[in-house]
């Protein structure tokens, strides 16, 4: 059994955030740390909350719903690929969807948000490494995609998210993050009414410090807080 000290890990990650911010001349209060709790049992989430994690990230609707029922007083972000038929289950529970990657999904989010009188905050996922296996918009298509989102009154576009290729070197990853920051600055100039570009979600356990140096203000840390994921159990 791997011994995982969630509280110690949270403390460590927070220290690393402060150090990265110092290097980048940034204020660490700008950084939102999302504890990515997918596959982890609820008792670890309790510990993380106790250690100061205020926002949890899940990537499956079913799992988010179960944990949502058991853990109060925290915020939930949806970070995984979202199927249209799952939107209705999470729309009332999450504060931010990181993974808008398709116009049909946007339509569904808009419709479901409207039904419950909510304006849903979303990030556009960019497929920064142009990987076939990954979701997201190509950077060349981002302004057209923004234009196609401008009609949705119950969606507020708050920024961008990316997951760089897993096999990228540190230098390559840094370059992907730099490119993301440029796209982010471009999209900030877009003047649609339902756009309020604030968040750049990038950086995971292995690269969140680089991401902060390159301008991220939301980082998504799973393994670095909760330890290795449990994938052995049957899929839900
Ligand atoms: C699983 C996941 C993470 C966390 O990854 P770690 O390497 O464990 O920190 C972050 N973002 C997304 C979108 C994920 O699916």
Image (cartoon, rainbow, N blue to C red):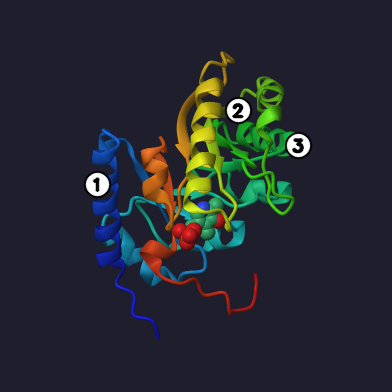
Quarter holding the N terminus?
bottom left
> What distance separates the C-alpha of mark 3 from that of mark 1?
41 Å
Of labels 2 and 3, the one closer to you = 3
CB atoms of marks 2 and 3 within 8 Å: no
* Picture disc at residue 19: 1
Mark closer to the chain start, 3 or 1: 1
CA gap between label 1 and label 2 equals: 38 Å
218 horizontally vs 11: left or right: right
Q: Could you tell me which quadrant the C terminus lies in?
A: bottom right
Label 2 or label 3, whichever comes before in sequence order:
3
The foreground one among 197 and 83 is 197
Q: Are marks 3 and 1 in contact (CB under 8 Å)?
A: no
Q: Which residue is mark 3?
A: 104
Instruction: Name the outermost residue toward the top.
Output: 191
Q: Position of residue 208 (x, y in %)?
A: 40, 50
From the viewer's perspective, is residue 159 above or below residue 72? above
Identity of the residue drawn at 45% across and 48% down: 203
Q: Which residue is mark 2?
A: 154
Q: Residue at x 71, y 39 (%)?
A: 105
**Location of residue 144 (image quadrant):** top right
Give the mark toward the camera: 3 or 1.
Answer: 1
**Camera-nearest residue between 162 and 43:** 162
Residue placed farthest to the bottom in the image? 1
Q: Secondary structure at mark 2?
A: loop
Q: Is residue 182 above or below residue 214?
A: above
At x 65%, y 46%, the residue is 87
Which class describes the residues within 10 Å of circle 2: few (<14), some (14-19), or many (20+)?
A: many
| Callout 1 secondary element | helix
- In the picture, the disc for residue 221 is none
């Amino acid at each position: 059994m791997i011994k995982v000290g969630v509280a110690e890990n949270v403390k460590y990650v927070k220290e690393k955030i402060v150090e990265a911010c110092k290097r980048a001349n940034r204020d660490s209060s700008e950084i939102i740390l999302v504890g990515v709790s997918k596959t982890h049992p609820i008792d670890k989430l309790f510990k993380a909350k106790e250690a100061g994690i205020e926002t949890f990230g899940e990537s499956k609707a079913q799992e988010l719903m179960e944990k949502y029922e058991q853990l109060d007083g925290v915020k939930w972000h949806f970070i995984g690929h979202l199927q249209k038929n799952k939107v209705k289950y999470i729309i009332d529970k999450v504060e931010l969807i990181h993974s808008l990657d398709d116009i049909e999904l946007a339509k569904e989010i808009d419709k479901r948000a409207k039904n419950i009188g909510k304006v849903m905050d979303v990030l556009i996922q960019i497929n920064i490494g142009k990987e076939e296996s990954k979701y997201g918009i190509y950077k060349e298509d981002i302004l057209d995609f923004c234009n196609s989102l401008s009609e949705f009154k119950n969606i507020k576009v708050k920024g961008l998210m990316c997951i760089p290729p897993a096999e990228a070197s540190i230098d390559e990853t840094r370059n992907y993050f730099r490119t993301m920051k440029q796209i982010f600055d471009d999209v900030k100039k877009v003047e649609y009414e339902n756009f309020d570009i604030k968040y750049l979600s990038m950086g995971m356990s292995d690269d969140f410090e680089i991401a902060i140096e390159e301008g991220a203000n939301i980082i998504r840390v799973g393994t670095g807080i909760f330890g290795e994921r449990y994938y052995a159990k049957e899929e839900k």
